[in-house]
Amino acid sequence: MKARQAPLPLFDRTNEVVCGVDEAGRGPLAGPVFAAAVILDPQRPIEGLRDSKKLTAARREALALEIREKAFSWAIAESSEQEIDDINILQASMLAMRRAILGLHRRPTLALIDGNRSPVIDVRCDAIIQGDDRVIEISAASILAKTARDAALLRLHEQYPQYAFDQHKGYPTALHLARLRLHGVSPVHRRTYGPVRALIDELAAFARRVPG
């Protein structure tokens, strides 16, 4: 079993209002990308915060409820499939992060961002690789973003049950790819993503070959 990476050393936060920021949903072929920003309340600690991907679905949901209840401030935002196709997934993720930070009811003085890039915003940012398992504020944001996106994909499943979004949450699994070929591209698929783009091009080529 791979050892968990040690948390980052504590630093002086006396005059800082720190928020953690993370996103969920860069890899899927469908649905929005989500981001969350969280300012924790040191007077109301939350046990068990870590990278959402390393938690069971039930544990994520329980922690998400606790974060919403105990955090000093939290916000969740998204960028749509259309925005992803228009500006690319990286920029759409940064946009969702920016929206989440701006959605906090208190302005942070420092945003700790999971990964190696930060959104363009007039708040001091520090990007931390693997921050979602090393900084509790980012862990909390990871959990909120992940659970919010999973809930959104369940709602999309109600609209488009033929794609089985409830099972794969939009990721390019064998099931999703099979359903995509069977039913075609839906309005919530990301048209610039390889498998979706390939199917669109294939259907367009077929239409050109078949007499009208």
Image (cartoon, grey):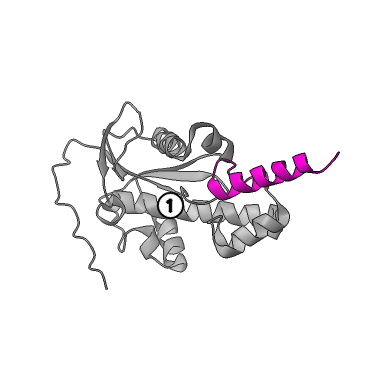
From the viewer's side, name the closer residue of 68 and 6. Answer: 6
Judged from this view, the residue extending furthest toward the bottom is 1
Judged from this view, the residue extending furthest toward the top is 122
Amino acid of disc 1? Leu
Residue depicted at 25% across the width and 52% down the height: 135
27 displayed left or right of 164: left
Near mark 1 (Cα within 10 A), the count class, few <14, some 14-19 or many ≥20, is many
From the viewer's side, name the closer residue of 135 and 170. Answer: 170
26 displayed left or right of 121: right
Residue 28 locus on image (x, y percent): 52, 51
Residue 32 locus on image (x, y percent): 54, 44
From the viewer's side, name the closer residue of 83 and 63. Answer: 83
Total numbered circles: 1
In the image, is residue 19 part of the stretch drawn in magenta?
Answer: no
Residue 184 locus on image (x, y percent): 70, 51
Residue 140 locus on image (x, y percent): 35, 53
User: What residue sits right under mark 1 in the picture?
Assistant: 144
* Residue span colored magenta: 186-212
